[in-house]
Image: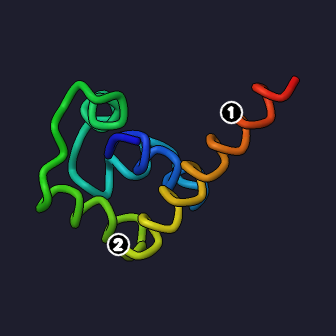
Amino acid sequence: MHDGEKIKHLRMIKGYSQKGIAKKLGFTQQAYSKMENRQMKIDDARMKEILKAMQCSGEELIKIETFFISSEQKMIRHTSMV
């Protein structure tokens, strides 16, 4: 899972829109969308800004990543059994 997918899932779970988070960060919605869609690199400093804007900790981000990876693995096992 790349960083863009992580922040997208986190944003959706937290109930934020791209436009709302972009505004908090001082970006356009289009620029923020590029980060989620892997068209713009997210360095460590920018990731910290994004997490702060979403009022989220790095731990929450890791939990979300772990949840989605686990879910994907379960889906793969289930479909291979069918």
Amino acid on which disc 1 is placed: Ile
- The quarter holding residue 67 reads bottom right
Does residue 36 sit above or below 46 in this rendering?
A: above
Does residue 66 sit above or below 20 in this rendering?
A: below
In the shown orientation, is residue 61 left or right of residue 40? Answer: right
Q: How many marks?
A: 2
Tell me the distance, in whole angstroms, between the alpha carbons under discs 2 and 1: 27 Å
In the shown orientation, is residue 42 left or right of residue 68? Answer: left
Residue for point 76% across, 26% down: 80
Q: Residue furthest front?
A: 81
Residue 20 at x, y = what percent? 43, 50
Residue for point 47% across, 72% down: 60
Q: Which mark is residue 13?
A: none
Residue 77 at x, y = what percent? 73, 37
Location of mark 2 (residue) = 58
**Label located before the other in sequence (2 or 1):** 2
Residue 44 at x, y = what percent? 14, 59
Amino acid on which disc 2 is placed: Gly
Location of mark 1 (residue) = 76
**Mark 1 Cα within 10 Å, few/some/many (few <14, many 20+)?**
few
SS at circle 2: helix
**Mark 2 Cα within 10 Å, few/some/many (few <14, many 20+)?**
few
Of residues 34 and 26, the one nearer the viewer is 34
In the shown orientation, is residue 22 left or right of residue 65? Answer: left
